[in-house]
Amino acid sequence: MGLRSELVESLFPTLKLGANNHCAYGAEQRAATRMGLFCTGPFSRKAPRCYASLAGKSDLRKWERTFMWFLGMDVGTGGTRAVVVDGAGKLIAGASSEHAPFRTAHPGWAEQDPEDWWRAAQEAIHGALAAALEAGSAPREPIAAIGLTGQMHGAVLLDEDGAVLRPAMIWCDTRTQPECDWLTAKIGYDRLIELTCNPALPNFTVTKVLWVKEHEPEIFAKIRHIMCPKDYVRYRLTGEFAIDVQEASGTLLLDVTHRRWSREVAEAAGIAESWLPTVYESPEVCARINETAAGLTGLAAGTPVVAGAGDQGAGAVGMGILQPGSVSATIGTSGVVFAATAAPTKDPKGRLHTFCHAVPGLWHVMGVTQSAGLSFRWLKETFFAGRGYDDLTAAAAEVAAGSEGLEWAPYLLGERTPHLDPEVRAAFAGISTVHTAAHFVRAVLEGVAYSLQDTFTLFAELGIPVSGIRLGGGGARGPLWRKIQAGVYGHAVEVLTAEEGGAFGSALMAGVGAGHWANLDEACGQAIEVAERIEPDAGDLVAYKAAYAKWVKLYPALKSLR
């Protein structure tokens, strides 16, 4: 139901034209701005314009489309979050529902119940819709399209009736190293990189299916569908078996170069291609809300659902990391450096993940630091309980760049990029009597940045361009960590006005799928705003160049202790 002229006239009953066909009443202009009504005509795309200045039906349709709402949903590890975004790319409201903690029956195991994701999804959708009605100053419009994102690499196994066969093994389940070794030997390391652009690692979905094949053959015999977490939620919403190319890249079953399933890998693993969902580009409509889900969620039956992307892909869209040269460095529990590329980059040593991008026709590479924000949290909770993060970083800001030789190797959980070593462990090095508590805090912040710099070093080695870096997660929130990263990376860094995460990025994909925006570049151009640009300090550049050259010697030393 679109915005009607009589509604506009009732909202703005005293409209008169001023100069340049703009409303002469500033109060009503401001009211229009609050409603998200922006000029789409020749005057200015960002200047508010009143209904009386609209030239005709074409302008009215554009104005009505400002009221389109899109829903993005992130099926994470700890919970599911749904957000409502308007046609101007602004967040209207959001709501979350926690998941039950994942189960760890044995060390290295991590399992969740897919039914719990579905329960949380229903609650998050209801909450977001209700919050949008309360917070939105615009009249209620039906959700025009839906996008999904979520934790990657999980293995959801369904039988011929679509029933879940066992708890899902999720991304942080690391029991499958023997299956990785078997698959690598079966296909060959170089051939596996050629086919999938990635080595076999325990987080990839196919290794989990192989574990079930080996240890639970009675379950494996019943498999008829293999899905990832967010795609199972989509199945419950629509009844369709679908996946996007970015998420599919993380299964190790996709021919990443050609953006299609790899028959060779599937056959080697004993997996029928019929078990795999249909592959779509991320902004492509792949399903519609069915009657059952409509009754359970409050969404309208027939609402289009786009393919979406995994959490890293959707998060990159939400930060505007779309075209080659654009890079994000995000510090959450782990740390990720993500770069868009024009072609798939195949690292012969498998040190980087190479996936299809959520942007059709593009790819991305990413390096991962296992314990990024986790390092700072561990330090605080272990040694500085009761002190706040801001208090700790304020003291650390008084310490010179390089922490007077104190170093931190952030390998609390082993390391992925560039070492692919789950056994290495963390350490402080270079401790002396001059070092205070503030030195230890700064050393941890710097050590995490050095570890992320390892990925930038690989980018340079492989010829991956870096023209701009945007910071996200906890590492973007404090001025000291921003400054440290600019100095270590040797590059100016940007911070966004609002970082809404993967759910926001998936909502933008929904808007593209609905035809509201022509493509993701247009969507991000309207929705994303840079708040601050931090140039590296000249003194920091000198200090960190020398400190990083010394820090890279830590890993070989730690490895030699085993």
Image (cartoon, rainbow, N blue to C red):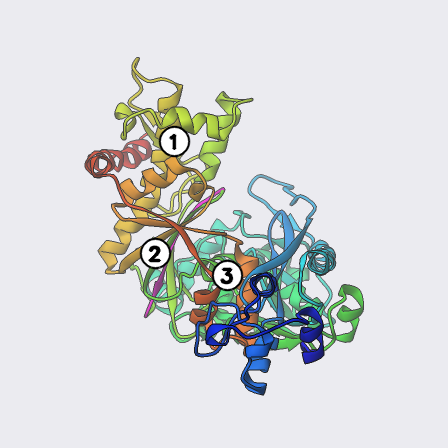
Which image quadrant for residue 451? top left
Q: Residues within 10 Å of mark 2 (few under 14, many from 20)?
A: many
Q: Kindly tell me whether residue 402 is visible in this rendering.
A: yes
Q: Give the vertical position of 326 relative to 255 (above or below).
A: above
* Front of the two marks 2 and 3: 3
Q: Earlier in the sequence, mark 1 or mark 2?
A: 2
Amino acid type of disc 3?
Ala
Gap in Å between the C-alphas at discs 3 and 1? 28 Å
Q: Provide the major secondary structure of the magenta segment.
A: strand
Q: Give the vertical position of 309 relative to 366 (above or below).
A: below
Q: Which mark is residue 314?
A: 3
Which image quadrant for residue 57? bottom right
Q: Earlier in the sequence, mark 3 or mark 1?
A: 3
Q: Which residues are magenta?
A: 333-342
Q: Residue 249, percent across and down?
A: 46, 65
Quadrant location, the N terminus: bottom right
Gap in Å between the C-alphas at discs 2 and 3? 23 Å
Q: Nearer the viewer, residue 312 or 156?
A: 312
Look at mark 1 in the image and give the residue it sits on: 444
Looking at the rendered structure, the secondary structure element under dot 3 is helix
Residue 33 within the segment the image draws in magenta: no
Look at mark 2 in the image and give the residue it sits on: 350
Residue 334 within the segment the image draws in magenta: yes
Q: Residues within 10 Å of mark 1 (few under 14, many from 20)?
A: many
Q: Which mark is residue 295?
A: none
Q: Nearer the viewer, residue 420 or 438?
A: 438
Q: In screen coordinates, is 553 left or right of 203?
A: left
Single out the residue that lies furthest toward the top.
Answer: 433
Quadrant location, the C terminus: top left
